[in-house]
Image (tube, rainbow, N blue to C red):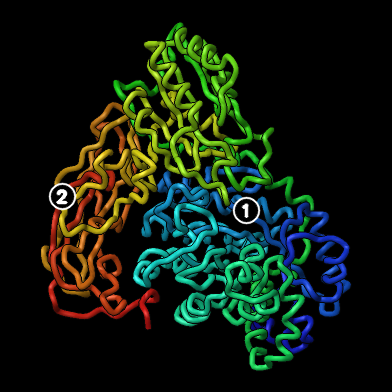
Amino acid sequence: MLNDAAKAERLLKRMTLTEKIGQTVQFGRCEAQEIEWIKQGKIGSLLNVYGAEKINELQRIAVEESRLGIPLLIGDDVIHGFRTIFPIPLGEAASWDVEAMERNARIAAAEAASEGIRWTFAPMVDMTREPRWGRIAEGAGEDVYLANQAAAARVRGFQSPDENGYPTVAACVKHFAGYGWVEGGRDYDTTGMSERVLRETVLPPFYEGIRAGALSVMTAFTDLNGVPASGNKFLIREILKGEWNYPGIVVSDWESVEELIHHGYAEDRKDAACKGFAAGVDMDMHSGVYLEHLERIFQERPDMLPLLDDAVLRILTVKYRLGLFDHPYVDVRKRERVMMIPEHVEQARDSARKSIVLLKNRGKTLPLDLGARKRIGLIGPLADDRHNAMGCWAWKGRKEDVVTVLDAFRSRIAPLAEVTYAKGSEVKQPLERGLEEAVAAARDSDVAVVVVGESEDMTGEHYNRAYIGLPECQERLIRAIKRETGTPVVVVLMSGRPLAVEWVHEHADAVVEAWHPGTQAGNALVDVLIGEYNPSGKLPVTFPRSTGQIPIYYNRKNTGRPHLYEDYVDVSDEPLYPFGYGLSYTTFEYADLRLDAWQIARDGSVNVSANVTNTGERDGEEVVQLYIRDVVGSTTRPVKELKGFRKILLKQGETKRISFTLTPNELGMLDERLQFAVEPGKFLVWIGPNSGEGLQGEFTVMDTKEREGDGLQRH
């Protein structure tokens, strides 16, 4: 029996030049002209078309009315859910629950596929240290190790087998590469970095997503060191298709091949098409430059024809891999069996509460005391907001499906305590009499829960912020409640990025980061606030005290004067909350760090372990984190690097010994020649609750044996 690649090669031999070019063309609309092109074999893929019935009809046209009957590949942005909306990816990463990330992607894929969507433009695996950038919401934060785990999990989830054994949808790791390094947090802006940063920090999550089987890769809008990513041969042909031998589809971002003109890299649409295709972009998203110009280009440059065959083979192979030739149509009844069914809703709730991070809890303000005659004030612009609770990239989510915080307070808290609601302000502007009503509600309450943060249109693509504090009207709301009442205040932040909220941290009695939690926002938050779920989230990104501290991240390099290290004279050099930080309603104690060896060979390993004890009054989960530092290297190394984590459940009073094994994979680095090596010398190691705390030990790697490189080295 022929494999998918062999089937694709056999079909390729039957194709005309026009039909081959057609497979490289994707459009984000489907009107009369596009339908005619489908019949002529001039379009191979579509996005932004919705509904099983409509997609089935488009597939019928492609299969029955085009000469070769090649099915369409239908894509969509299924980022953190389809109809059932999960927390934004940054929030998912705060759960440090890799299995949950995979389950969420599997559910999103099943719902999307029930509507005929077989390709998602996710996961976004861009590394960033720039919280002003709106698209930080779509990634896994600032750390390479955590991002690697998230990338692989999401790819596995999206591509989990359907009932016919095919990948449910094709995943697409994006944006290749360096998009998260935009200057000033301005989306689409230029990016510049050394090849060391590219290979050590930016590329690894792509590599892990590809190792997990990602069937496609999307190029970035940005340039990289002067060459736009969608025309960058070094990135696509040399690294991705060369060093990594990647066999899948490389698709541009929306019109990013045509945008080579705006970069000043291409003269016109024809030149853009030539340079994008020559660089290795197999499919052009929506701009039409391949449809318009590739035939003429190949007539003038017949030496490029092998590149066309290679691109079409990749596209056809993915279509075979997805089973589209055998099953081009979707059963329209299937969506009733999978769309937002109770199991999916419950998973959304569980995922949302696992993503919530308790940042402060002075005097055990939380969980809320719901005893007799207790009065709870619920205040804030996001307390009863269905749309913004879903966050960015939740286009298929429906407001009527969302459980708001107020909904959950009324259904679950009101039967046990008196609930008073006041909006207080809008998200971005004051509300007439809002402050007065909010202060009155707080004054008459035993505790005030104030739900503030960002709207959906303050995060996501091209929604960047120069100042990442709370909008002025919201901070004024919190200040008024604190100033004019003696009521304890719980501040709940809903946001798509870390926020600089130093005043809130200093004055609020409790602070909770809920991100944009999705469909089950209210139920998940109430689960945490009343203690039915003990919060276990940990920050996947550093929270600055001030926007002016950016970039601030835990795994910085040391300076030549570490004893004088201070960022600024007008603000502390410490973050507001460090990477990996998160509190619980119980307490955990770390003790008895042990290493099974103090010296190891360069190809050896060392086991590091510690006891973790739940010393508090209730059961709880803890994310135990392992960090290392290579003290002296041929190139400077970060002061700490995450190299392992484990999320564990400990009953009250229970102790578990948690161990990690550090192998050459974790201990290695790129040396001064950008070759992977484990270098001899002293290593520090920590096991602890976050990047700022932990038990410390050390060991030495002896100069005994070289280790061969892996797929991230430069050959």
**Count of numbered marks:** 2
Tell me how far mark 1 sits from mark 2, CA to CA.
47 Å
Residue 52 x/y as whole percent: 78, 54
> Does residue 615 appear left or right of residue 515 in this picture?
left
Q: Secondary structure at mark 2?
A: helix
Residue 615 x/y as whole percent: 23, 32
Find disc 1 in the rendering and name its residue. 78
> Does residue 6 appear left or right of residue 439 in this picture?
right
What's the mark number on residue 499?
Answer: none
Residue 7 x/y as whole percent: 69, 82
Asked which quadrant contains residue 481, the reply is top left
Three-letter code, disc 1: Val
Above or below, comparing residue 158 to residue 657 in the picture = below
Three-letter code, disc 2: Leu
Above or below, comparing residue 376 to residue 227 in the picture = above
> Does residue 136 appear left or right of residue 394 in this picture?
left
Find disc 2 in the rendering and name its residue. 564
Residue 705 x/y as whole percent: 18, 80
